[in-house]
Image: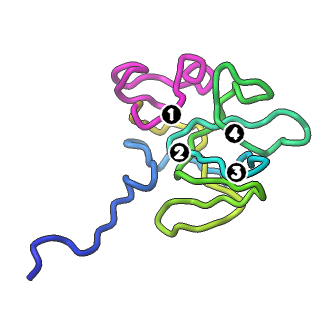
Amino acid sequence: MPTTPSMSFEPALIRLDPVMNQRDVRMMNVTLNAPTSGTLAYTKGQLLAEYSNSASVGTYGVYASTGTGGLNIPKGILQYSCTVDSSGNIQIYGEFNQTQRGVPMYMPGMAVWRVGDLIGLDTNAVTVLGAAFVEGSSAGGLVKI
């Protein structure tokens, strides 16, 4: 009998999930900003923001508190790491390694997250998302979003 596994499955390595209050999580499938050429990589746990100009409403990109065009207003958390090509096709790196036009994004609710799992979390994001630290601070701990 083998002493090491020949196959394993670990969702935590490929998908981001909240650490508490998972039943309170709401999700939405979103379209990500496509580059003009090549591919653009996104990482699970990345805070996403929606473009506000009329031509791009419904399209999401990387949140930054100094962003413009709506990118300074966080809207959710990316569940899977992925890449987007210039045609808008999203290659999701997850359980099924699939290509599609949208990707799952967690919406603010009452879920609790590890601060270290969230990319782009800053004081502006905490305020806008109505987040509260369960323990620790923006340097580490748990945050309810």
In depth, the one of 20 and 118 nearer the eye is 118
Give amino acid for label 2.
Answer: Thr
**Residue 119, labelled with which disc?**
1
Secondary element at image label 2: loop
Contact, CB < 8 Å: mark 2 with mark 3?
A: no
Determine the CA span between mark 2 and mark 4. Answer: 11 Å
Give amino acid for label 1.
Answer: Ile
Residue at (64% x, 66% y) in the render: 99
Q: What stretch is highlighted in magenta?
A: 116-145
Circle nearer the viewer, 4 or 3: 4
Image coordinates of residue 18 in percent, x first then y, are: 43, 44
Secondary element at image label 1: loop
Contact, CB < 8 Å: mark 4 with mark 3?
A: no
In the rendered image, which residue does mark 3 sit on? 30
In the rendered image, which residue does mark 4 sit on? 61
Examine the rendered structure and indicate whether residue 52 appears above or below residue 22.
Answer: above
| Image quadrant in which you'd find residue 57 | top right
Give amino acid for label 3.
Answer: Val
Label 1 Cα neighbours within 10 Å, binned few <14 / some 14-19 / many ≥20: some
Circle nearer the viewer, 3 or 1: 1
Determine the CA span between mark 2 and mark 1. Answer: 8 Å
Determine the CA span between mark 2 and mark 3. Answer: 15 Å
**Residue 43, labelled with which disc?**
2
